[in-house]
Image: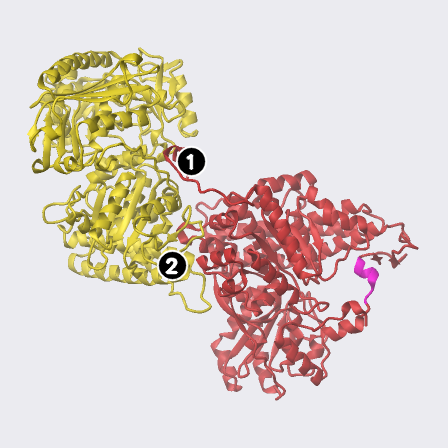
Chain colours: A red, B yellow
Amino acid sequence: MDKTNIIKKESVDTAVESLLEKARKDGVETVWERLAAQSPQCSFGEQGICCRSCSMGPCRIRKSAPKGVCGATADTIAARHFVKMIAAGTAAHSDHGRAVAELFLAVAKNEVSDYRIKDEKKLMQLAGDFGIKTEGKKKDEIAREVGEIALAQFGQQKGELAFIKKAPAKRQEIWRKMGIVPRGIDREIAETMHRTVMGNDQDYQNLLLQGSRCALSDGWGGSMIATELQDVLFGTPVPVRGQVNLGVLREDEINIIVHGHEPLLSEMIVVAASDKELLQLAKGKGAKGINIAGMCCSANEILMRHGIPVAGNMLQQEAALVTGAVEVVVVDVQCIMQSLPETAKCYHTKIITTSPKAKIPGAIHVNFDEHTALNSAKEIVRRAIENFSNRTKNISIPREKTDLIAGFSYETINYLLGGAFRGSFKPLNDNIINGRIRGVAGVVGCNNPKVTQDENHLLMVKELIKNDVMVLQTGCSAIACAKAGLMLPEAAAEYAGAGLAEVCETVGIPPVLHLGSCVDNSRILVAANEMVKAGGLGEDLSDLPVAGAAPEWMSEKAIAIGQYFVASGVFTVFGVTWPTLGSENLTRLLFEEMESTLKGKWAFEPDPIKAAQLMIKHIDKKRKALGIDKSRERVLFDMAKRRELEAV
Amino acid sequence: MSKIICSAGIRGAHKIVNRAKEKWKEAIDKWGPEQEVGFPNTGYYLPVIYGILGIPVKTLKDMEPVLERCSALLPAFVEEKHYLPYLGPALDAGMATFFAEEILEAVRYLENPDFYTKQEEPTAGNIWLGAADDIILRKRGIEFVDGSAPGFAAILGAAPNNETAVKIALELQEKNLYVFMSAESGGKTFSQQLVESGVQIGWPTRLVPFGPDTSATVFAAGFATRAALAFGGLKPGDFQKILLYNKERIFAFAIPLGEVTEEWYANALGAVNFGFPIIADTPIPQILPTGICTYEHVVSNVPHDKIVARAIEVRGLKVTVTKVPIPVSYGPAFEGERVRKEDVYAEFRGGVNHVCEWTTSKTMEEVEDGKIEVIGRDLDQIKPGSQMSLAILAEVAGRKMQKDFEPILERQIHHLINYAQGVMHIGQRDTAWIRIGKSAYEKGFRLSHLGSIIHAKYHSDFGGIFDKVQVKIYTEEEKVKEILGKAKNVYAERDARIEGMTDEGIDNYYSCTLCQSFAPSHVCVISPERTGLCGAYNWMDCKAAYEISPTGPNQPVQKGEVIDVKLGQWKGVNEFVYTASRQKIDHYNFYSIVYDPMTTCGCCECISAVLPLCNGVMIVNREHQSMTPCGMKFTTLAGTIGGGISSPGFIGHSKYNICQRKFISGDGGFQRIVWMPKALKEELSKRLQIRSEEIKVPNFLEMIADETVGTTEEEIISFLQEKNHPALSLEPILG
């Protein structure tokens, strides 16, 4: 076993630790064992200098062979690999967005009956973003136009993505000057894949320009479309109390875990679970009810909107099965381990795949179609109920579960900071300017078994809030911190610095805010935008005292997200491992040179405390540039000063 | 702890909204849904509801959607553990509180019409004034605009003892702030404490006893909301702008004295929506982070001797007060205070005694700055209750001093003396009437202090136009007569000179953007024959103000090329207005009510409106509360045309302007006047008569209809025909 992959323990989560013990007893193989079996892992691959783009290869770059067969350098190979990751991540988020847009349009056209538009206010706002005239038009008509424009973003060939205009003017100018404004989402993904075939774009800097453009078509395109349309369809999240960790599974109820990413499926499962007939059926089988719990971003979606309990994050998917108490794990797309059906064999659990894009051998496939959504959902729930009687006595549900407050959309934060009449981001900016809040960090991303599960997230986030940096979260990182109780309002007094704690107490919020799933990283962009608009913190996203991080990243999606944050002017730190270290030039471009063009840059720091310190250092640098690093005199107004004020 | 405040405030809001619902149901049962409701004499209905929600509540029925909105706004109680965020919901609860309180108070006006005096001052048996009507709002508005009242303090409850109450009130008065009082604490109210201590309360002394209940606090919020509507030109329902306007321009704060109840917390949350912070004397929790208010939101446990200073600092207000070396308190808040006959120590009454006030310029050598002489007997040499003659002669000198500034300085004597506590001043020149109260005398006030006031305030307010001033105060009968004789000649000379000034005779007018602190796009341009519409500034005042403060709100405006001589439009003026109005207005006419008239802000003294049937105009002054022939009361008119817009058919102007020769001269002028309130006619009768003779219709006054003739065009037209009013034979006013 390679020493680099030896970790002290698998997880900081005692629920996971106890179930791993049970797994070993039950003879179940888990991700940690497979990692051990894989070790040592390919160091060329890890450094991004293994190229298998053509059959002249595979080529591995080393001192004795500094070029691939085709002549490609380490810079080219690592850059191609890196931008391919961006393209893959962008494709994943954007295909999610496309599915939402398709459903949205079908709803607007009254072609499906199980969904309806829930948030009309946001619909109108979206119509405004798209430049649609709404006067005298009916809701459905407006929705149809919104849906059509949203869907057209994917196949658009020229011009600019519609949401680009949401960014601060100065940011748009930077993008235009660099020629990296995305034209259409699919086009940027396709062009990236074209550029990376053998013998094509072999200038690492040029490749990264396209990588940035492709990533932007994720953050300001596919992901943003997904979030915005989901809010209109399923409701914009508002603060909600929820519970997290495997303790949410119930011994006396039918347990269904919804795992994956898109809320199209999970929303319907939630509806089906409250169907009277099915509840009756469940009772007939001796169950007290039907308990839905989420996993990964599916969890985040239904937690944010309905307060549905969260079973856990990515590295808990196998552990959930080991409880022996799960009737069905229903999955759609992304982050689903192929091992699930194999693990399920040891218990009574059924794995049900639903997306034609994601099938797994050994799983049952129930095709999920938006036209028959509720019926499909009911069928899945029925299968779970019928499986209840197959439970064995080998059940162990951990007691660990923690309360959390979720539901912090941009709109919610805006409301919370002033109510229905004075809502704005101004109080946030004010308290950043006066130094109570040092800055804002987005800590997001995955779990990775190469590090103790959740540990990096927790250490980093605690270090940040201790230093008065407010933390916004999505994805598995959010679930990690929720499990540790950081998403409770009481956490402010316990973990946050005095300034941040005071602001949190004023508003009644936790110091760490849950913004949703991984497509909801677009909410962080929107929030940052709003900070620029609220004034006093510069004119561009890059002027803000903010930073981003994914301390336990593993998915290509994380690279896409990271790159769109960097391309939006945000300093972004990743942990665990870094895929370009085999190319000094590319690494320098990412870690240093991008700051002079994009005004944002990457950093790699596996130590989460050190990584947090880097973020704080960056935030302090921005504070200094804004001139808010020193305390300010109170300005007292006389009449002459009042006359100088602009009209409100 | 914000949580404690928000939790208590949300509970209080629930109580208040529930009470409003019950009261409303009772009222509906008793009076029926169509029953009219409202606060007295206002065009803003229930003002917070009207401003924030845009709902004009006219009947009991109209309250229903407001109560529904209250219910929707009321959040759930804050839980002890793992609570949901509360700040936004709590602020909503505060708003719901204000809406509910307006409903409670409106129902009270219905059920108990005499609960409030509905006047500016307490009556014999009742100290509670209730909501300010629009006359008060507009009259006081100008003080808010020009900075003589930088804001207001809403005091809830009572001080621990009367002495402390008086101290706090006095300190607020000395800082020129209005004090709005409501609610009781420990069975006492702040208003009662002041009355018990012999302090005069009411609008004139800026100590306003709104009401004894917590719900009367909403009258302060209503005043603030109306300021935004009336002076800020904001539209009802544009809640965000109205609230931000208040945060940025109305420097108000609340001082709860005594135990803070859940209902008080609910009101506090309402106040925070307006950007008004809370400064408490009890050890309640604090909310220090900024954001909704400019600085801290709630500051507590402030000792009584520090509470005013702390409140002003927390609100971010700068109050500059000139220290006047006299033994009584001094400031605009004491301007409206009266000295009653039985309290008079000494009286100098123009018309009965020989009295005059005269400011004149001298050479630098002739004036010794700060020298104050009393020639004749001083107060300690006369009997209490005496009446005697008095001449005040202020002699100024300085390189920038001009003859034209003398009357401006002289006119200040009225309010400067009036600002002294226990001293009353009415009139000017040889009609001045001064009373010095026994209390002022007992505190050591002597006649020389009249000179001290003039010396100190002339320097602080007009230091830019002179260097030295000395004051001579005569009580010796013969001396007074001699000075009076000289002064009268000067008065006559000045009047002739002012009369002779014309718009054509000078090259530049003056702008006045004084009220841009409140009406950000309004620009007055003041010419000799069109004085400022607030009545406070004429061309000469502006000229002096410019000399004093060259970068201030009064700037010379070169007329430039004439665009329309009849209607009064100049290129230079247009250009200036375009810039100064922040690109909102690109031109207007000085002398027309019909064609692109000058813009009007919320503080005009009078409004003229075209009456097409009568082929003339009607004029209504802001004191006139009743209906007018144009179908609108003054307050509705002001609400419609104020806020810095040009509204053809309507124009705001001063009282003085009515008899100036250029008054709507582009549309036919003075002879177009067909209607004005009787009281206004009487007030201006002398000047109206002179103008009537000038236009060769000496009995013109009799031809002007008033409310006794009618309040509709139909009613007055036959009167005009009968009197053969000249307007009827003029060409059609609307062209």
Q: Residue furthest front?
A: B381
Q: Is residue A287 magenta?
A: no
- Quadrant containing the C terminus of chain A is top left
Disc number placed over residue A645 in the picture, else none:
1
Q: How many marks?
A: 2
The x and y percentages for residue B438 are 12, 36
Q: Is residue A401 left or right of residue B270?
A: right
Q: Label 2 amino acid?
A: Pro
Task: Tell me the crowding category of disc 2: few under 14, some 14 to 19, or many 20 or more residues within 10 angstroms, Cα based.
Answer: some
The x and y percentages for residue B209 are 20, 47
Determine which quarter of the picture holds residue B5. Answer: bottom left
- Quadrant containing the N terminus of chain A is bottom right
Residue B591 in sight from this viewpoint: no
Front position in the image: B600 or B320:
B320
Determine which quarter of the picture holds residue B718. Answer: top left
Looking at the rendered image, the disc whose residue lies closer to the viewer, 1 or 2, is: 2
Residue B154 in sight from this viewpoint: yes
Q: Is residue A46 magenta?
A: yes
* Residues drawn in magenta: A41-47
Q: Which residue lies under the disc numbered 2?
A: B285
Determine which quarter of the picture holds residue B627. Answer: top left
| Residue B35 drawn above or below residue B11 | above
